[in-house]
Amino acid sequence: MPKNKHQAEHIIVGAGLAGICTAIELLNHNQKVLLIDRDIEERMGGLAKLSFGGMFFVDSPIQRKRGIKDNPDMAWKDWLSVAEFSKEDSLPKQWAKLFIHNTTEHVYHFLTDKNIRFFPVVHWVERGMFKRGNSVPRFHMVWGTGYELSEKLKFHLLNHPKRLTHLKILFNHKVDEILTQTGRVIGVKGISEITQESFIATAENTIIATGGLGGDIEQVKRNWNSDWGTPPNKILNGAHHYADGTVHFAVEKINGKLTHLDKTWPYAAGVHHPRPTKENDGLSLVPPRSALWLNYEGMRIGPTPLITAFDTRFLVSQICKQKKKYSWQIMNMKILKKELSISGAESNPAFRNKSYRQVAKTVLFGNRSLVEDMLNNCPDFVTANTLEELVHKMNTLEGNEDVKLHYVKDAIKEYDAQIDRGKKYFNDEQLIRLQQLRNYTGDRIRNCNFQKINDAKHIPYVAIREFILSRKTLGGIQTNLNGAVLDTKGNNIDGLYAVGEAAGYGGGGIHGKGALEGTFLATCILTGRITAYHLAGKNLINTL
């Protein structure tokens, strides 16, 4: 019998963004909380702390100020297009509509009331490739990145007026079992990963906020979506190192319903982290849009060429149609310096440090320090002064002769010839999309002005080897609109709740098949707030 016992009104398992926001709201309502996290205190905040901090809002004050006309009805149509919900997706669909109509009021203003600010230019991602995506820009970047977001909310939690009397936090504690009694959840059981002693914690309610399964690559492969065929041999890990599904499967053992685990949100352009902290540690590139995206043989992927900002799922699916499921991007040094970007707080010091001057310099002239770091320290970047030398280095890196020089030369020749003919005669889909991107000020200044690859003034050539990178799990523990976990028959499991990514960001799969981006952090906050209000006997949103 464990000698370490803890008790509270509410247990929250996971001190990431969803768990922190749930705890803040419970304390606001004078509830006693035990917050349990597997990580160390310095990393409190989970994956959100490492993120770029993009958040999805509809008809926000920033959009209005920028003259962007948005409304929930348009956002709802965009969401349905990308989600492709099935007839059985009743709860995810209800959560999605709830989120769209409330994200600005109950997430944006919740954050700005806590002195969290947003960059004044709204980013436009997931515009849609062959179907509608975001009809207008909605990606609001936290000024200070996800690091600032997590640190500010952590500060509010740890300095809450009820902190000393109503909040206890256990770090380095792994939960691996859900405790029940007479059909009701009464708490959790686990082990301290410092002392290796077991513990139990009991409460009236237990809230699961442990993130997804993307940090366990074997789990990712087992749940690989059938639309993409067999999983790639190598998938880089861009998720939290404790996102392994341990608590998901503990919930399943007590008959809780896990759903849509094959719905995931990987990224197409992962590279090895220059300073890895876990096996196959990866970073997610924002792929240079003026680069040519090639398959493992050096052929341009098509017939529709790949370009980021329109449809992440399409990028992943096209790469996964190849015999070998990794890819290359080829460019010259001008394109690399101007357009290379990496998603996340770590790779964006200008945004993280809240320096408008540095942001302007980076946008206008490129992130020189990032380019130098990746060229010098990431094994996936190779450079050469001739295409012959470049292809040789690409093949040496992979240890085979897969990349064919004539494929690479042909792709570059045809692309450059289109640019030489002039914008009036573009019929290359990548150039047409680039022209579309450059119509929006937020994108024009971040992209080259139709730069040829074969340009003697901007040699050396650069090739980047890119892998599929695991990140988010779109499915998870199924919940109702109050966050209560449902069993396999659709009934509430008394005393058990789930929020954030653990709950599939709401209902076990709020995104369906795909995301409009910026929706992950915002849904973590909204699901946590809604659930906390419900447990305090109140409604955050009247429509509930």
Image (tube, grey):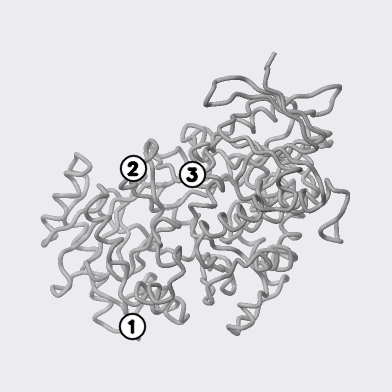
x and y, in percent, of residue 218 in the image: 47, 32
Give the CA distance from mark 1 to mark 3: 43 Å
Any mark on residue 425, and which? 1
The image quadrant that residue 484 belongs to is: top right
Relative vertical location of residue 105 with respect to residue 67 in this rendering, above or below: above
Residue at figure coordinates x 75%, y 49% from the top left: 162
| Nearer to us in this view, 304 or 512 | 512
| Nearer to us in this view, 313 or 47 | 47
Q: Earlier in the sequence, mark 1 or mark 3?
A: 3
Which element type, helix, strand or loop, lies under badge 2? loop
> Mark 2 sits on what residue?
324
- Whether residue 130 is visible, yes or no, is yes
Residue at figure coordinates x 31%, y 77% from the top left: 450
Which-is-in-front pick, marks 3 and 2? 3
x and y, in percent, of residue 210 in the image: 62, 39
Give the CA distance from mark 1 to mark 2: 34 Å
Q: Residues within 10 Å of mark 3 (few under 14, many from 20)?
A: many
- Whether residue 76 is visible, yes or no, is no
> Mark 3 sits on what residue?
239
Q: Seen from this angle, which residue lies furthest right?
A: 537
Q: Amino acid at mark 3?
A: Ala
Q: Amino acid at mark 1?
A: Tyr
Q: Are marks 1 and 3 in contact (CB under 8 Å)?
A: no
Q: Amino acid at mark 2?
A: Lys
